[in-house]
Amino acid sequence: MEIKRIISPDLKQHEEAVIFELSFAGCVYAEEEAQLLLCAAQTPDELFHMVDQRAAGFPLEHVIGRAEFCGLQIAVDPGVFVPRMRSEFLVRQAIARAFPRAVVLDLCCGTGALGLALAASVPDVELHAADLDPAAVRCARRNVEGAGGRVYEGDLYKPLPAALQGSVDILIANAPYVPTDAIDLLPAEARLHEGHAALDGGADGLDVQRRVAAEASIWLAPGGCLLVETSERQAGHTLRIFADQGLRAEAVHSEEWEATVVLGVRE
C-alpha cells in the first residue's frame, strides 16, 4: 500500500514500539504495517488502539479503513470483504473487454473496488453495483457514488432497475466460491472478520455462480461478457455452468496472480 501522508513527529517517536508490538503479535510484515498505522492515526491514543486491534487479529484494512487496489485507495469498513490482490487479474480481464461508455455491472460488489477500478481505466462507463450485505452497500456507496456509479442493496439481480435488462456490456461477479466445509480452513482474519455470505459458496463453492449465470443472459447485451473469479480446480465446473446457460465460455489463468477467471459471452 502506498503511504499517502507524512508521519507527524508525535507519532514517529512511537515507531519502534509499534513494530515491536506487531512483531510480538506475529505480524510477518510488521515494519510495513507499522508505517501504514502511523500514517492512518491522528493521535498516539488512536495509534495504539489501532495497534491493539491489529494485534488482536483484525484485518489491517479494517483497522486503517482502506485498501490499495489497482492503484486506487478503497474505503473498507469493518466487516466488509477486503478486496484481494489476485482480483486485480479479474479486473484486467474485464478492462480488456470493455470500451468507452460501456454499461458495467458489479455483482457481489463488496466495497465496489472491482467496478471502480474498471471505471478508472475505461472512459465514461455507466457503472452499477449491487450487494446483499447492508454494510457492504454503505461502504460501496462511499467508493462508487463519488465516481458517478449507483449501488443497489439486495440479492444479486433483484434490486436492479428493469431498464438494465439486455444492456449490460461487462458483468463482473466476484461471487464467493469457497465450499462451506472449507470455511473453517480460511485464515482467521477472513473467517472471523468478514461477512460469512461473502465467503461461503455453498456445498461445492459454486452455488452463487450458478445463480449469477442462470440470469446473466437476461441482463447482458448481445456480445456482453460475464466474468467471475474461481479456483483453478473449480474452473472446469464453472465452464460447464456457463455453457449450460448458453454462454460462450473460456477460462484464463495467471500464475503470476495465482488467479483464475472464467468468462462467458452472450451470443
Image (cartoon, grey):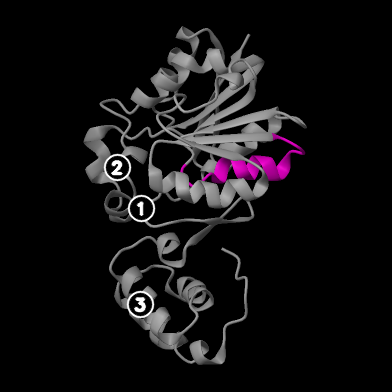
Q: Is residue 197 above or below residue 190?
A: above
Residue named by callout 3:
49
Cα distance in 3D space between marks 1 and 3: 18 Å
Q: Is residue 160 above or below residue 195?
A: above
Circles 1 and 3 in contact, beta carbons < 8 Å: no
Q: Secondary structure at mark 3?
A: helix
Q: Secondary structure at mark 2?
A: helix
Q: Residues within 10 Å of mark 2 (few under 14, many from 20)?
A: some
- Magenta stretch holds residue 111: yes
Circles 3 and 2 in contact, beta carbons < 8 Å: no
Using the rendered view, name the quadrant where residue 226 is placed. top right
Residue named by callout 2:
196
Q: On the picture, is 88 further left or further right than 135?
A: right
Is tag 3's residue or tag 2's residue first in the polypeptide sequence?
3
Q: Residue at x 36, y 69 (%)?
A: 27
- Magenta stretch holds residue 27: no
Using the rendered view, name the quadrant where residue 196 is placed. top left
Q: Is residue 216 visible?
A: yes
Q: Type of residue at label 2? A: His
Q: Residue at x 30, y 77 (%)?
A: 24
Using the rendered view, name the quadrant where residue 53 is placed. bottom left
Q: Type of residue at label 1? A: Gly
Q: Position of residue 77 (x, y in %)?
A: 43, 56
Q: Type of residue at label 3? A: His
Cα distance in 3D space between marks 2 and 1: 9 Å
Residue named by callout 1:
79
Q: Nearer the viewer, residue 44 or 134?
A: 134
Q: Quadrant of the N terminus?
A: bottom right
Q: Is residue 239 visible?
A: no
